[in-house]
Image (cartoon, helix red, strand yellow):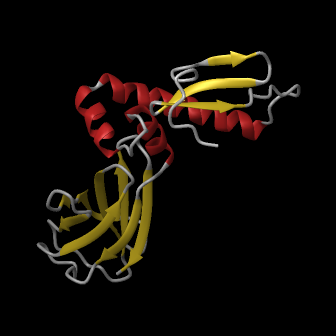
Amino acid sequence: MKQTRNSIMRGTSGALGDELVFRQRAGKTVISLPPIVKAYPPTTGQLEVRNKFLEACRYAKTVLANPALKEAYAAKSPAGTSAYNTATADFFRAPVILSVDTGNYNGSAGGTILVLATDDFKVQSVRVSVIDADGEILEEGLAVAGASGTDLWTYTALNSVDITGAKVSVQAHDLPGNVTTQETEL
């Protein structure tokens, strides 16, 4: 049963013997069972997850050390979630490339490639490469972000190139360093 007025338990934290653990979360007292300590050694997969989580915690600490980033993450955090937790979660989620529009690009200078890329926090940059059939890079550069609040990125070609058999490779990068790559045939 949910208690809304319980002055005895308000602000309580700690353990009650080996039976209950009291914690404070978002200004509320949460009662749970104590954690179970496993008697067997962790598997390789578990160790990999622990190391990845350690990296995520290090990233979250660097976010907290930067006042501007901390404020930005706090603004994106849902009620009851700290900037630290939001930054940790962002570390585990790579950006998503929703679409690559090459309709306005025919290999000539000034042609545009539109990329719709999103992330749970922010897409930091989008790199576009035009690659020929032999795997050689014909053209490469950073796309320009659209208006504030949109996930549309525009790459404008600087050179005229032969795009016969070529493809476009798009890389979306987020703040923690996650990269998503998508290739599209021209």
* 31 vs 49, nearest the viewer: 31
Q: Quadrant of residue 72?
A: top left
Q: Measured from the top left, where is residue 38 in percent x and y?
A: 84, 28
Q: Residue furthest left?
A: 110
**Residue at the location (27% across, 79% down)?**
102
Q: Is residue 148 above or below residue 9?
A: below
Of 19 and 121, nearer the camera is 19
As drawn, which residue projects farthest toward the right? 40
Does residue 156 appear left or right of residue 134 in this picture? left
**Residue toward you, 103 or 96:** 96
Q: Residue 77 lies in what quarter of the image?
A: top left
From the viewer's perspective, tell me whether residue 57 is left or right of residue 105. right
Give the residue drawn at x 41%, y 42%.
177
Q: Position of residue 139 (x, y in %)?
A: 26, 64
Image point (59%, 32%), residue name = 30
Q: How many marks?
A: 0
Quarter of the figure that contains the N terminus: top right
| Residue placed most toward the observer, 165 or 17 | 17
